[in-house]
Image (cartoon, helix red, strand yellow):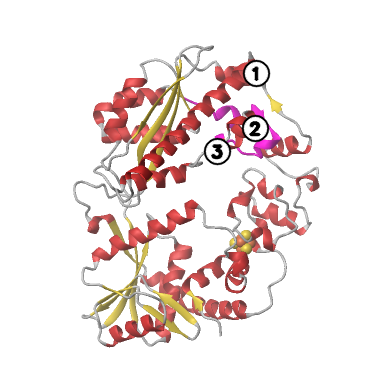
């Protein structure tokens, strides 16, 4: 009999085929390395759990998952140890390591606590997670009385030392979990049968009716007839599951096979049309109108930030972005050469005040502030202003002068087949300025930049490595603002 872990079961609930591949075809399931983003999620989960344990000062940690760890767990259960971290149980082909198990001396029963590094309870996954644990412990004759989710409290604002009691919300979800128990027990048996079958389940996987961003690393294996670029890549098609399912039923995976009467939005139509007809759509008058909104000097600005789950400084809440770096290219006149300014904090404290002081030195009272996807930069400015009221007028002025260069592309004034329906700077730059890609950089996207900053400010690396990472961060951020200047230049030359 196969042993189904809690993780296997949760993957199974999301996708049977993927869970089967995990158990039987490790070569396929683990083929692609975890992305930096995935690694960061795992690391964040571990950090948050370590803080949540502080709510139970006398807890005992069980290390490992093997039979020795299971025996240690059972020995603690026998002597009614009050709190266990990571106790591990196995019975009837099911295995789970629990985050926190508490023996309540008053009620003579057990309370389950599942720690989640999120700001709320995700009903579909978190409750099923607890229901699996509850069913397994009942099989072992261990009576559970209450079940809880411990998650981060988004209303908490750090002031001074971290207040762990206020950092977390402990939600009692006993009733909701109890309701799930009969269904979970049945579903666990179905998972056991499905995942034990030796023969690989045939056919497409369920994500055939989901957009590309929802596909896992085994999608290409399970769906070899789906091209690398096709109907799953149409912009926002993920919200039209029924449409994708219909196309899949009719064997339509390539853009070339879409029926003439396929219902598409104007953005989707532009994308498909540009691809099928190898056409570039350029609306020069509209682009000229956009660019005329800009006033010199033009400040091309980009921030890098780090969303710390556990607030590191006063004034921050869980996952609030810490801005730690900016790059700025300043263009004084239309034919001028941009000059570069930058800021990067490499010390452990809150970078906000030093960063604002640097910005104030380099950004004057007039002129447009050009960014890419303005919601992000504007939110950072707004939050900085809330934390540092003395700088609010300056930061409000920046937001009042912001121009989003992405508008030219999101408003569909410029559509190229090689943008592939995207409007991010990483979609546009390689097409308009192929010589300026990010491929030569050690840091190529924001998630890695954020983790790199975390690394150099956590004080656990040698100075030489720290210096190298700081150089890489500067090169990456500078590329973003220079790219904006180059794209602006391209558009400006286009419209004369
Ligand atoms: S892409 Fe396929 S295999 Fe992967 S999660 Fe989706 S349905 Fe499952």
Instruction: From the image, tell me which residue sits under label 1.
Output: 494
**Left or right placement of residue 46 versus residue 279 in this view:** left
The C terminus, quarter of image? top right
**Left or right placement of residue 132 versus residue 292 in this view:** left
Q: Is mark 2 within 8 Å of ligand 1?
A: no
Segment colored magenta = 403-425
Numbered tag placed on residue 431 in the rendering: 2
Instruction: From the image, tell me which residue sits under label 3.
Output: 440
Classify mark 1: helix, strand or loop: helix
Q: Nearer the viewer, mark 3 or mark 1?
A: 3
Q: How many marks?
A: 3
State the image coordinates of residue 172 (x, y, percent, origin top left).
33, 67
Image: 40 above or below 306? below
Does the stretch in magenta take in 413? yes
Q: CA distance from mark 3 to mark 1?
A: 28 Å
Circle 3 crowding by C-alpha within 10 Å: few under 14, some 14–19, many from 20: few
Query: Circles 3 and 1: CB distance less than 8 Å?
Result: no
Q: CA distance from mark 2 to mark 1?
A: 15 Å
**Left or right placement of residue 369 versus residue 358 in this view:** right
Instruction: Assign ligand 1 to one image quadrant.
Output: bottom right
Residue positioned 48% across, 18% down in the render:
338
Q: CA distance from mark 2 to mark 3?
A: 16 Å
Does the stretch in magenta take in 210? no
In-front residue for pair 291/183: 291
Which is nearer the N-term, disc 2 or disc 3?
2
Is residue 73 at all visible to an observer of this figure?
A: yes
Q: Nearer the viewer, mark 2 or mark 3?
A: 3
């Amino acid at each position: 009999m196969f042993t189904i872990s809690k993780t296997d079961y949760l993957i199974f609930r999301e996708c049977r085929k993927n869970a089967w591949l995990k158990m039987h075809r490790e070569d396929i399931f683990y083929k692609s390395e975890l992305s930096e983003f995935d690694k960061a999620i795992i690391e964040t989960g571990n950090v948050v759990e370590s803080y949540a344990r502080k709510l139970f000062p006398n807890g005992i940690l069980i290390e490992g998952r093997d039979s020795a760890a299971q025996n240690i767990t059972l020995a603690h259960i026998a002597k009614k140890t009050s709190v266990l971290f990571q106790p591990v149980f196995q019975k009837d082909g099911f295995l789970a390591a629990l985050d926190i198990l508490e023996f309540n001396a008053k009620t003579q029963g057990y309370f389950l606590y599942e720690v989640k590094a999120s700001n709320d309870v995700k009903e579909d996954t978190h409750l099923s997670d607890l229901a699996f644990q509850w069913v397994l412990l009942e099989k072992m004759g261990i009576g559970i009385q209450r079940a809880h989710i411990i998650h981060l409290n988004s209303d908490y604002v750090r002031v001074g030392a971290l207040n762990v009691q206020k950092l977390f919300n402990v939600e009692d979800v006993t009733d909701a979990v109890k309701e799930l128990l009969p269904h979970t027990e049945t579903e666990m048996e179905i998972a056991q049968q499905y995942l034990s079958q030796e023969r690989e389940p045939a056919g497409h996987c369920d994500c055939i009716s989901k957009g590309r961003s929802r596909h896992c690393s085994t999608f290409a294996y399970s769906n070899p007839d789906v091209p690398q670029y096709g109907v799953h890549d149409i912009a926002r098609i993920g919200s039209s599951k029924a449409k994708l399912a219909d196309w899949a039923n009719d064997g339509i995976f390539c853009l070339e096979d879409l029926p003439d009467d396929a219902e598409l939005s104007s953005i989707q139509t532009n994308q498909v049309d540009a691809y099928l007809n190898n056409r570039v759509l350029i609306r020069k008058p509209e682009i000229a109108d956009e660019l005329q909104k800009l006033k010199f000097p033009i400040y091309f600005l980009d921030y890098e930030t780090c969303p710390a789950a556990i607030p590191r400084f006063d004034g921050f809440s869980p996952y609030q972005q810490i801005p730690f770096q900016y790059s700025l290219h300043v263009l004084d006149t239309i034919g001028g050469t941009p000059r570069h300014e930058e800021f990067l904090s490499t010390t452990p404290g809150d970078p906000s005040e030093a960063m604002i002081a640097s910005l104030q030195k380099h950004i004057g009272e007039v002129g447009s502030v050009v960014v890419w996807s303005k919601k992000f930069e504007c939110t950072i400015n707004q939050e900085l202003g809330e934390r540092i009221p003395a700088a609010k007028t300056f930061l409000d002025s920046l937001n009042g002068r912001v121009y989003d260069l992405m508008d030219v592309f999101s408003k569909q004034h410029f559509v190229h087949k090689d943008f592939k329906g995207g409007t991010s700077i990483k979609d546009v730059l390689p097409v308009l300025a192929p010589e300026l890609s990010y491929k030569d950089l050690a840091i190529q996207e924001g998630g890695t930049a954020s983790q790199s900053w975390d690394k150099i400010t956590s004080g656990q690396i040698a100075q030489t490595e720290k210096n190298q990472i700081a150089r890489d961060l500067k090169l990456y951020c500078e590329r973003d603002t220079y790219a904006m200047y180059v794209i602006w230049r391209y558009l400006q030359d286009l419209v004369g």
